[in-house]
Amino acid sequence: EDQVTQSPEALRLQEGESSSLNCSYTVSGLRGLFWYRQDPGKGPEFLFTLYSAGEEKEKERLKATLTKKESFLHITAPKPEDSATYLCAVQMYGGATNKLIFGTGTLLAVQP
Amino acid sequence: DAGVTQSPTHLIKTRGQQVTLRCSPKSGHDTVSWYQQALGQGPQFIFQYYEEEERQRGNFPDRFSGHQFPNYSSELNVNALLLGDSALYLCASSWGAAGANVLTFGAGSRLTVL
């Protein structure tokens, strides 16, 4: 069964304390892996798309990497405004759709 | 440039009632997908509409139905509401129905079933 698992479920960091979020997946054929950020009461906001193992993308304090079985979202020197839920999602080959399968997310809290 | 807009933002219904949620996609997008997000969970795919047809459906009962209009806007209808239907309903739009296209999400409609 196609599955996406994120860890940890929740993470509390001090401002400036770097860390990583994990997204592991088991799918039959990966077309793309997506990272979204979701603030309370809002819809997910797109961060990155990764397509192949070894690929990396960066945006400000965030860096996403991809292997054949998992993806990491590295947060360097986080600030309180980085507090949010980070969602990982995968899209598979097959079917006339760009349907995403999401994980349950990691709730990140960055304290000043 | 307006993103994805959804209405209403919040609504309360009782068991057995019916509800209609509405979505206008981002300008330039022609495909609309609907997701259900229960509290503390990730979004779950309900179905996708492209060229006014349902293209794929997730694991949701027939009580969930939808429609896409010629202007690409969409509606999600849920009949015979159950307590378990309480969730945030997210609309996402994209260009094209296939490929690794980035989905743009709306802020959602928060449905509470009493």
Image (tube, coloured by chain):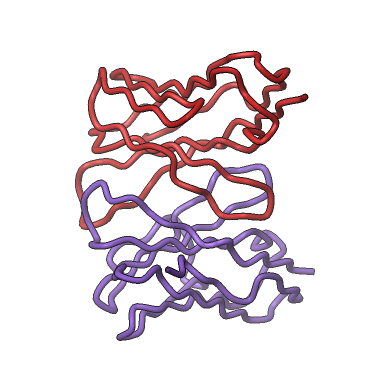
Q: How many marks?
A: 0
Find residue B47 and report its horizontal and vertical position in percent.
39, 63
Q: Foreground: A32 or A12?
A: A12
Q: Quadrant of residue B29?
A: bottom left
Decide which of A48, B52 is in the foreground and name it. Answer: A48
Q: Position of residue B61 (x, y in %)?
A: 48, 65
| Image-quadrant location for residue B33 | bottom left
Residue at 47% from the left image edge and 24% from the top image edge: A73
For the colour red, the matching chain is A
Q: What's the residue at 44%, 54% (across, down)?
A: B45
Q: Judge from the rendering whether residue A68 lies leftward or rightward of residue B26; answer left or right.
A: left
Q: Is residue A67 left or right of residue B74?
A: left
Could you tell me which residue is drawn at 30 percent across and 86 percent down?
B70
Residue extending farthest to the bottom is: B70
Residue B21 on image: x %, y %: 56, 76
The quarter in which the N terminus of chain B is drawn is bottom left
Q: Quadrant of the C terminus of chain B?
A: bottom right
Provide residue A22's location: percent of width, then percent of height: 49, 21
Chain B as rendered: colour: purple
Please give left or right for residue B29 compared with residue A60 in the image. left
* B27 up-or-down from B71: above or below: above
At x 43%, y 24%, the residue is: A63
Q: Would you place residue A100 above or below residue B54 in this image? A: above
